[in-house]
Image: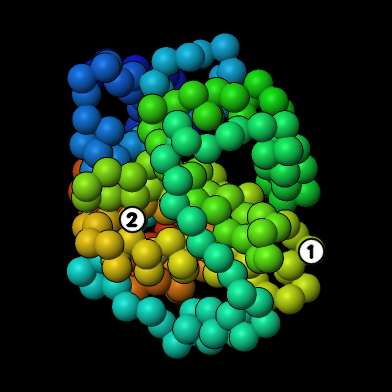
Amino acid sequence: MKFLFSESSIDYNNYKFGYSVNLVLNDNDSIESVYSQGFLPYTGNIKNKEEVYYLARSIRVDLNDYERLSENNRIVKNAKKKFNIKFESIDKTDFNHNEEFYKFCIDFSKERFSNKPLNKERLSLIIDRKNYNRTYIFSIKNKIIGYVLAYENTNIIHYWFSFYDTKYLNEFPIGKFMMEHLVYHAKKIGKKYIYLGTCYGEKALYKVRDFKGIEFYDGNKWINDNKILKDLCKSDPIK
């Protein structure tokens, strides 16, 4: 494991000099251990094929404390009343990442990603990463409506990238449905934690509201105080 530091934000008046923290995993390093230290996988540089991670305000659900909230229960019930939604969990090596899959994911990113959408090169990098080893598939009448690319081991799941057919947004909140389903699934099969990415800005507050058992990494430790997390998100300089 190799740590990398690069200069970031500077507040000279208050003597605060920020450094971004990255690390590169070696073959024998534990992916679970990296997640437990607040790091998340980085794929922003398509020329870098190393197993790079970045330190951030990441969040996870402690599944010992998780229970499905009433609003999520309503979403799940309403979706299942309308559609017979099939869920599959497939090992990455058994899944065909074909052109249809690439188009589905890239088209979704063009429509829904707030930053730069995916291209084929970056999606290929994501597929090749060791922290992606599980594909979750949602379908209706043999038609795929959503994918989740994830890492899973004995103890954890990392919900990394999700892609879905946006036309179903007219029927039910499919993104929320998929995330709630995976959190519930993780609890059901005995995982300890499910990691849900970063939590910055007010738009990320749905993650705080939607799941009981939320914890966030403050740079040193995991904290389960939702009020602190909400205040941080509301004060983030992100629109």
- Which residue is under mark 2? 194
**136 with respect to 124 (left or right):** left
Residue appearing at x 29%, y 66% in the figure:
187
- Which residue is under mark 1? 167
On the question of residue 210 being in view, the answer is yes
**220 with respect to 89 (left or right):** left
For marks 2 and 1, give the one nearer the viewer. 1
Does residue 228 lie above or below 67 as drawn?
above
Task: Estimate how packed mark 2 is, as few (under 14), some (14 to 19) or many (20 or more) residues with alpha carbons within 10 Å.
Answer: many
Which picture quadrant has residue 23? top left
Does residue 80 lie above or below 196 as drawn?
below
- Give the colouring mode of the picture: rainbow
Residue 64 pos. (x, y %): 20, 69
Residue appearing at x 62%, y 61% in the figure:
139
Q: Mark on residue 3?
A: none
Instruction: Indicate the quadrant containing the C terminus: top left, top right, bottom left or bottom right.
Output: bottom right
Residue appearing at x 65%, y 77% in the figure:
83
Disc 2 secondary structure class? strand
Disc 1 secondary structure class? helix
Residue 123 pos. (x, y %): 61, 29
Residue 24 pos. (x, y %): 33, 19
Judge by depth and name the residue closer to the eye, 76 or 93.
Answer: 93
On the question of residue 56 being in view, the answer is no
Task: Estimate how packed mark 1 is, as few (under 14), some (14 to 19) or many (20 or more) residues with alpha carbons within 10 Å.
Answer: few
Looking at the rendered structure, the kind of residue marked 2 is Ile
Residue 164 pos. (x, y %): 66, 55
Instruction: Indicate the quadrant containing the N terminus: top left, top right, bottom left or bottom right.
Output: top left
Looking at the rendered structure, the kind of residue marked 1 is Lys
CA–CA distance in space, label 2 to label 1: 27 Å
> Mark 2 or 1 closer to N-term?
1
Judge by depth and name the residue closer to the eye, 25 or 9.
Answer: 25
- Total numbered badges shown on the rendered structure: 2
